Amino acid sequence: MPADVTSQGSFERCAWSECLFAPHPTRRALLGLKPAWACRELKVRAHRNHSFEHVISAAGAWAAYAGIRMHWAEAPYDDALSMQVAGEPPDLEVIWYDVEAVRSAIGDEVPNWLGARAASLRKLSPAPILMVVIGLDASAEQVLREQITAVPGVRLAPTAQVLAGMANPFDDRLRRLSGSRLSEAANLLLAKELACRWVPAMLAPRLKAVIVDLDQTLYGGVLGEDGVQVRLSPGHAALQSALKSLREAGVFLGVVSKNTREDVEALFAARTDFPLRLSDFSAVEIGWGSKSDAIKRACVQLRIDPSAIVFIDDNPGELLEVTAHLPQVGLILAAADADQARRNLDYFPGLWSWGLSSTDLVRVADLHAETQRKSLSLQAADKLAYLRELAPKLEVSLWPTTLQGRLHELSNKTNQFNLNLSRLDEVAVHQYLHQPGKFAIAVGLSDRLTDSGIVAAMFGSVTDGEITVDEWVISCRALGRELEGLMAASALRALAPAAKVARFHYTSGPRNSPGRDWLVKASGQALAPEGVVAITLSTLPEIADLPISLTIQRNERP
């Protein structure tokens, strides 16, 4: 959601959920919803061969719920997808295509042809490209998905999967009237998918955590009154299962509840019918203080910003208290019908993602290992003893083209150690990987407790032996091990062994003080709000001086 949304607007969204996430929302009800909060203005250009208007009109309400107002520039119907791109590039390109028009002419070559059209559009526009293709089965969609893998910044919506769950996705009687064979129910469903899932996932990093209340939220009843005999309705069970699935996909779960810790532990020990276990929650804040303060403490434990959190509670007063102190937190009101909360969670903007990455799988386990690392640090006699016990391993990979998605993710998700806050899109990352004179470097980190995966990324250029670093980011999961300088040194020395100095671009942001603090220490210079500072590489740590193993992967330079 946009950063300028007011706290009142954040709470007002909750009142919309009953309409937006009803089992069968109606177009009339959707058109009656008018947001009173600020929305991000989004320019979208559509390349289509069938009607889009019925989807656009319905998508407005769901988009407003996501904090977005979409302005559409629609091309004429064009079966050939000639890609008209006059004027300024939009924020998003959408290919809206029904393959029925060309199936008889090119048959099984439809996925390959569509992939080529997406590649052509990429050459004409730097904007992200969303493909919504009607009429392909799941196997043909997979062929197309593989076709566009090499094209940066292109995503294929899982339309076949979405429509497969419908009884009647097509209605040929409407074709003459509406210009599309999609039924009204299909138009509404695709509008919801577009506005709540696909477009938010194109524009921003995935949310990192869902924090939940307990009483009347995860189950029916009040623990202090009903004891462990609280009610688990089918709806509550479904909500818990949805939360469990999010955790398995790398989203942190947390509990913030006004109860007694001993009672909560007894509840989860006794209720083996609960899909969730207490151990599934990476942050547990049980007590009688304000919930906004408890959420702040949970953020510290999870090492994330409140803007990356969704909070679910059945009490509107508690939601108002949270949004008054933490307006950036997303809110879901747990209604008496638990199915309503589950549907809201399923479509909460920013929770859906384009697929599970290896990083998603290690994130939760890596946080649990951090407690053990802190214990080792406290017990160790000095830094060297701590590192010998931890046994870290660094892997530096130069021009890692297969890691383009992870490099993009790091640039966009990292807030604390992000020197220049460039927020590189996939096209820009692709350029650093492929253009002569530019470079992109990935740094992986593991130790005897966990494999943290790719935790750092560096982007820049080398001209006549001079290194310029445009962006240097380290995931918050890797901070605290005192390896930031060594990661930078290892990357730069692997890139240009003869270089003596590297110039780092930086800017000041609301949360990137850890990165700027490191830059001050490494350069020995005070920083202006933004600029460029030089670091003498000989002052950075040497790998030979530390009990750390280093592997360098030199991929072929483009």
Image (cartoon, rainbow, N blue to C red):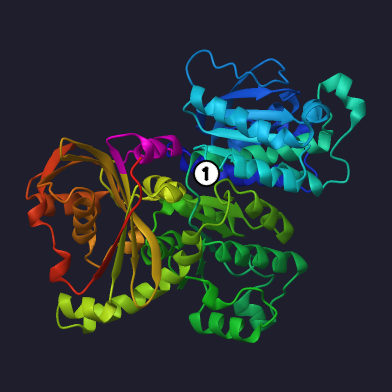
The front one of 174 and 50 is: 50
The front one of 203 and 2 is: 203
Is residue 157 among what the camera can see? no
Identify the residue position indicated by label 1 in the image.
10
Residue 325 image offset from top left, x and y in percent? 41, 51
Residue 76 image offset from top left, x and y in percent? 69, 15
Residue 46 image offset from top left, x and y in percent? 63, 24
Horizontally, residue 484 falls left or right of residue 280, namely left
- Image quarter for residue 67? top right
Question: Which residue, as the protein is rendered here, is positioned at the far front?
Answer: 556
User: Which residue is found at the position 43% from the left and 51% from the top?
Assistant: 403
* Element at label 1: helix
Q: Amino acid at mark 1?
A: Ser
Neighbour class for label 1 at 10 Å: few (<14), some, many (≥20)? many
Horizontally, residue 238 falls left or right of residue 356, namely right
Horizontally, residue 519 falls left or right of residue 431, namely left
Horizontally, residue 413 falls left or right of residue 256, namely left
Question: Which residue, as the protein is rendered here, is positioned at the far top?
Answer: 86
Question: Which residue, as the protein is rendered here, is positioned at the far right?
Answer: 173
Task: Give, as a single range, the part of the protein colored magenta.
Answer: 421-439
Residue 23 image offset from top left, x and y in percent? 78, 48
Quarter of the image that includes the C terminus:
top left
Taking the magenta stretch, the answer to whether it contains residue 160 is: no
User: Which residue is found at the position 55% from the left and 51% from the top?
Assistant: 331
User: Which residue is found at the position 66% from the left and 40% from the top?
Assistant: 144
